[in-house]
Amino acid sequence: MRESALVTAAASNAAAMPLLQVRDLHAWYGESHVLHGIRFEVPEGQLISLLGRNGSGRSTTLRAILGLVGRRQGSARIHGVETIALPTHRIARLGVGWCPEERAIFSSLSVEENLHLPPRLAEGGMPLDELYTLFPQLAERRRSQGTRLSGGEQQMLALARILRTGARLLLLDEITEGLAPVIVERIEATLQLLKSRAYTIVLAEQNLGVASRLADHIALIEHGQVVEAFAASELPARRADVEARLGV
Amino acid sequence: MSDIPLQAVLSQVMLGLNNGAFYALLSLGLAVIYGMLEVVNFAHGALYMMGAFGALIGLEYLEAWTGIPGLRLTFWWALLLVPLVVGAFGVLVEALLLRRIARLEPIYGLLLTFGLALILEGVFANGFSAAGEPYNGKPEALEGVVNLGFMFFPRYRLFSMLVAVLSCVAVWWVIERTRLGAQLRAGTENPAVTSAFGINVPRLRSLTYFLGAALAGLAGVVAAPIYSVGPHMGAELIIVVFAVVVIGGMGSILGAVMTGLALGVLEGLVKVVYPPMANTVVFVIMALVLLWRPAGLFGREA
């Protein structure tokens, strides 16, 4: 009886505790102060979209969560673990996967080597077969050098690469930017699939359409701060305001 | 050409291949360190010299220094242990010195390692004969000569070529064909993304310097029975080795090995045809290659 009560308490605790909790996060590149106290959180299994204009600090927020900025301050908890003083590779091992904006496919490695490069972070990563089913183009090009791929193929590879590792928190930076509509559709479908499998996703986006179709939560970022945060269901009512802020 | 006996040509080719094997082994270490860490390691010759001294000290001085009777490092043990010691020294250098300047211009790494080389040479010149000492620990099994059909070639020199070639193949295999090698290459290309995969990039850098330094140490041990062991043995060789790396292309593993062997042979041939040119031919080629292909024969053009 007592045990089951404990289990219930633990479960409700887990449900209450956000998987990612960012508080008062500041970041600097050299002398320039880029993030001025970012604050947001994502419950497990949900998708938050960070919306903002170019240079507002969306990408830097993702990089700062991973400790990939010159200097950072504040708090970023993953599964309740404070990561602010951890080196990047230790943060990643908490189960974080990152798709950088520039995709960063390794030119000296083939598609398959790129897929095999990241070490396993946890159980439950997607096996290679499943990734190739999800992205048949990658299967066809598995022996090609990474940089011979088209932009869309590189983006799929960048995404597939972190799905193999068992990462459950995905930081995706502009993953639809500059891609043909048919590829954007494919990536959106993949993200829907990941949501259905309870991945927790932070999506830095400029494309309001993509964000509105996928997000559970939206955070608007301006000048390195979250200026508005709301449930995605409120987006239709706020659309005009959001569009004005994004300058679209 | 017809008045030059074939015999002389072939024997110089063999000796050249032997020198080339050392060039290859040393330039391979340099290429690995440059390719992975972007450090132009001027201390490489000093590490090679330390390898040779490691073999000499293990054989001649260890017993007296430690006071333990009978404590001597035979050649085979030196071949195994000295590269590890030199590699460990390299790890210290990387962790204590190079890491601090990793974010600065490459010139700082070059200056730092150059200074380090001078210090190491000074330390060894202070404690040992500047003219060099012979190493008398060549194993009996490697004494004597082998009949190659066209010439008698010292068995030990054949052995040294074998060690060099096997080491080159092993390093190439690790870097190009293993998971660790893929991580090393990725860490060079994009350290941020590599560490975001959960890979400990600083540790990879230490490991790289270990590997490069250990290769230099290995070359030193193998060289000890052939050349006299002296504090300046590395400085003399490293200039040629740098020329080899520049010709092959900085950071190209295959380039370093192929160019090392080829230039050794070329030096040998020039020694037969026009001996005064033998010591300069490498630098003439370096100048020509820099004019024609600045990135080196095997280097990728930027």
Image (cartoon, coloured by chain):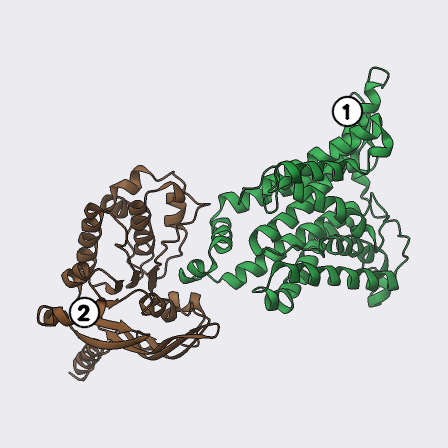
Chain colours: A brown, B green
Q: Which residue is mark 2?
A: A244
Disc 1 vs disc 2: Cβ atoms closer than 8 Å?
A: no
Say which of marks 1 and 2 sits in front: 2
Return the x and y of residue A166 as percentages of the image width and height.
31, 59
Q: Position of residue B165 (x, y in %)?
A: 66, 38
Q: Quadrant of residue A146?
A: top left
Horizontal relation, residue A204 to residue B302: left or right: left
Residue B259 against residue A102 in the figure, above or below: above
User: In the image, B30: left or right of B150?
Assistant: left
Q: Position of residue A88 (x, y in %)?
A: 43, 67
Q: Which image quarter: residue B271?
A: top right
Residue B10 x, y percent position in the rendering: 79, 24
In the image shown, does A1 or A49 lie closer to the viewer?
A49
Query: Is residue B25 shown above or below A73?
Result: above
- Name the mark on residue B148: 1
Assign a secondary structure to mark 2. Answer: helix
Chain letter, disc 2 residue = A
Element marked by disc 1: loop
Query: Is residue B17 in view from this perspective?
Result: no
Residue type, mark 2 in image:
Ala
The subunit carrying tag 1 is B
